[in-house]
Amino acid sequence: MKIINDNNCSWINDLSQRNSFQSLSKNLDSEWLIIGAGYTGLSAARKLGELYSNQKILIVDAQLAGEGASSRNSGYLVDSTLNDGFTSNKELENYKKKADIYKLGIEAVKKFIKEYQVDCEWNECGKYFASSKIEDKKILENFSKTLSKLDFKHSLMFNNDLTKRLGTSFYEVALYTKGGILLHPGKLVRAMIDTLPKNVDLFENSFLQNWKKVNDIILCNFQNGSIRTKKIIFATNGFLRSLGIKTNYNFPLTLTASMTRPLTKKEYENIGEPNEWGVLPIKPMGATIRLTKNKRILIRNTAEVRNPFKMSKLDLNKRSIKQKIGIKKRFPQLPDDIIQSTWSGIVSRSRNSSQIFEKIDNNIFVAGCYNGSGIGVGTLFGEQIAIKASNEETKEIKTIESRNRPTWLPPQPFLDLGVKARVLYERLRAKSEI
Ligand SMILES: Cc1cc2nc3c(=O)[nH]c(=O)nc-3n(C[C@H](O)[C@H](O)[C@H](O)COP(=O)(O)OP(=O)(O)OC[C@H]3O[C@@H](n4cnc5c(N)ncnc54)[C@H](O)[C@@H]3O)c2cc1C
């Protein structure tokens, strides 16, 4: 088995090509091994490298490091996600726990980029939860009550204001939240690779085929070698299930996104020269859409259950057409052929949108399943799972561990059937917002 990714993602193609990397080609022994080199695995490696400066830390990825979902996302570092108001104090408490984790995630990324002077097009411009249906005002008013109780700065906005700010008259109503950052996800993860401590050895294009625990040693088999390790951290997110990890608590979803070329001066004038912005949908299957710093439009409007290991060019093209329509609906004045790239990426979901952060057996740890908030939460969980695996406690770990745990999922084939039915229902509900 292999993960076969398209090579279309603009966030990756913006960066210079990496030309020095190694694959695993022999058998090794180690104290520490991390599987998966996205935000989570790289952050765990950075932390372990600091904590154990005299030891070798190994990190292995099936693809080039960072080129999974960590480079393929929409670049929203979120402080809040939409919740349609609460009916009880208990629910408010749970929302606060989630928001506390988001806050720690933002702090973790902020600390990283400050310490290493990372340019990742960081823009604290907030975000909009928007809808083209004025009836959705009610959802946003409920959400506003929740945000007020938790002291999040926000405001309701309507078509006129939104048209000026976004350059499209598509949206009738939105809730603007001041918190939250837009960034270039590829630049962020590339910086995590470039700044790995010297005692961290990164192996790429090395797919973990299987693993088992024998007494106190974990034996991992790759195509061209194996690693016997004393401690292991699994950071494979959407691929946790395929490695037999927490199989009844998470499942992969495949998303696709498209990005236009930069708008010309004239095109940009035609949409009213707005500043960079990001819109999230009110209904889960609606489109995420943003105007980037260099005046490109990014849209993500598909999420589906399918084989996470690859998507054919034909399937990707079909999704690209949906994204072209999504852009055209919002910006009819722009030409038809401005999409520069379309790509897919895998996320991990749980039933109740909660994350995985756990010791699953002696010396075996796992962090992942962030739904749509892995930039901040992945960075945080990576650092903190490394600390937890070192038997240390932090206030961050306490906050993380006080969250609700992912709830149980039914076995196959019921799981796929259930998720497919739910996705279909959500897609119909969000029809106008795609
Ligand atoms: C289109 C899209 C839009 C998104 N938008 C946002 C957003 O705006 N904001 C946000 O916060 N999040 C967003 N996300 C989610 C976010 O990208 C993820 O939550 C985040 O990347 C998770 O990081 P990670 O390091 O845990 O996992 P990943 O980045 O997925 O890294 C896991 C790594 O594990 C490797 N791996 C898997 N199996 C094996 C194996 N058997 N052997 C070796 N290596 C293996 C993979 O190759 C991969 O590199 C989006 C995702 C997508 C796809």
Image (tube, helix red, strand yellow):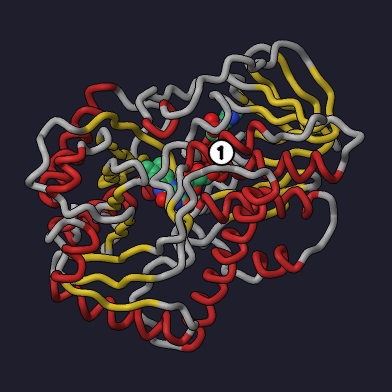
Nearest to the observer: residue 105 or residue 88: 105
Q: Residue at x 57, y 34 (%)?
A: 190
Q: Quadrant of residue 346?
A: top left
Q: Residue at x 73, y 41 (%)?
A: 46
Instruction: Residue 103 in the image: state x and y as whole percent.
Output: 57, 66
- Residue 240 visible within the image: no
Nearest to the observer: residue 366 or residue 323: 323
Q: In the shown orientation, is residue 432 left or right of residue 42?
A: left
Q: Within 10 Å of the Cα at label 1, are there few (<14), some (14-19), or many (20+) other Cα atoms? A: many
Q: Quadrant of residue 9?
A: top left
Q: Residue at x 51, y 43 (%)?
A: 120
Q: Which residue does the numbered mark 1 point to in the structure image?
A: 189
Q: In the shown orientation, is residue 15 left or right of residue 367?
A: left
Q: Is mark 1 within 8 Å of ligand 1?
A: yes
Q: In the shown orientation, is residue 364 left or right of residue 167?
A: right
Q: Is residue 50 above or below residue 434?
A: above
- Residue 54 visible within the image: yes
Q: Is residue 121 above or below residue 170?
A: above
Q: Is residue 418 above or below residue 134?
A: above
- Say what secondary structure mark 1 lies in: helix
Q: Residue furthest right?
A: 54
Instruction: Residue 6 in the image: state x and y as whole percent.
Output: 37, 24
Q: Residue at x 16, y 63 (%)?
A: 163
Q: Residue furthest left?
A: 332
Instruction: Residue 235 in the image: state x and y as whole percent.
Output: 62, 41
Q: Quadrant of residue 171?
A: bottom left
* Count of numbered badges drawn on the protein: 1
Instruction: Residue 215 in the image: state x and y as whole percent.
Output: 85, 35
Q: Amino acid at mark 1?
A: Val
